[in-house]
Amino acid sequence: MQKDPVGRAAARSGTNDGDAGQALIQARKLGKQVAGPDGGLTILEDIDLTLNRGASLAIIGRSGSGKTTLLSLLAGLDVPSHGGVWLAGHELNAMDEEARARLRRRLVGFVFQSFQLIPTLDATENVRLAAELAGLDRPGERSIQALRQVGLDHRLHHLPRQLSGGEQQRVALARAFVHSPPVLFADEPTGNLDGDNAAAVTRLLFDLQRQAGTTLVLVSHDLELAARCDQQLALVEGRLAPAAPEPAPAAPAAMAPMPPP
Ligand SMILES: Nc1ncnc2c1ncn2[C@@H]1O[C@H](COP(=O)(O)OP(=O)(O)O)[C@@H](O)[C@H]1O
Ligand SMILES: [Mg+2]
């Protein structure tokens, strides 16, 4: 039997990211303006955020409120017009695109509303690719293990189009967590799923997050999903604000305004 002295822990020990302090995600005065057809458009303004290791934050907001833009900035997929982002102590502004991509492969997992699996790769190959890009040891074994964790060991060689939506999102979860990422961004992860599948994906997402000690930022307008996070904030007119409290119970009838005679 071939012995492999380089285990799971060692696969991540080549970096000091885990020791970069408690704050895994920091954003300071983050802003994004774009050129729209009618002139400049401010999508985000003055966003400040600090998220510690293992914490979870839900950002809620209407469609078009800037949620995806904010996740893209936090993940270094897009560049801010103002301010900066630090991921595990690395200042994204100070890095070029290639360096940010390398950092993401090691530190970040993503889950998208539309799954975004590679259509020509089967379930195992989709997960394995992420494992390889993250530089994991024994990527094949690790991929199968990750798919087992999401209950898909009977679908290892199905292509995405041969899987249901719920199954595709479970493959995406296996892919996102295969390298136990310190940070995970989830953009409307249950947005394309029916009730039962949404509940199963939600349960798995939070189980995997806890097991891996991952810092999670998810955006959603699913309030039930958002309530599972430690903290909830709302994006309103480009700024982060405390999420609105639960709607107050309806006023008792005696206090309702009298109808006109
Ligand atoms: N590159 C861009 N150019 C112009 N407008 C954009 C661009 N990116 C996003 N927007 C606009 O900014 C707003 C926020 O988009 P987005 O972050 O995708 O919102 P959400 O994810 O909350 O639905 C939308 O009104 C969108 O049309
Ligand atoms: Mg969006």
Image (cartoon, rainbow, N blue to C red):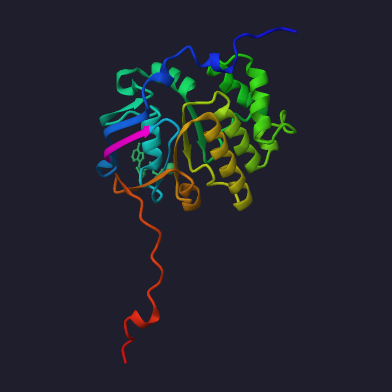
In front of the other: 44 or 184: 184
Q: At 33% across and 30% down in the image, what residue appears?
A: 26
Side of 175 where 86 appears, left or right = left
- The residue that appears at 35% across and 22% down in the rendered structure is 89
Residue 259 percent coordinates (x, y)? 33, 86
In terms of image quadrants, where is residue 73? top left
Indicate the quadrant containing the C terminus: top left, top right, bottom left or bottom right: bottom left
Q: Is residue 47 magenta?
A: yes
Q: On the rendering, which quadrant does ligand 2 occupy?
A: top left
Q: Quadrant of residue 168?
A: top right
In this rendering, does residue 149 appear at all?
A: yes
Relative to 196, 112 lies left or right: left
Query: Mainly helix, strand or loop, the magenta region?
Result: strand
Q: In this rendering, is residue 130 above or below 196? A: above
Q: Is residue 113 above or below residue 79?
A: below
Coordinates of residue 28 in the picture (x, y in percent): 27, 32
Which quadrant is home to the N terminus? Answer: top right
Question: Residues in magenta?
Answer: 45-51
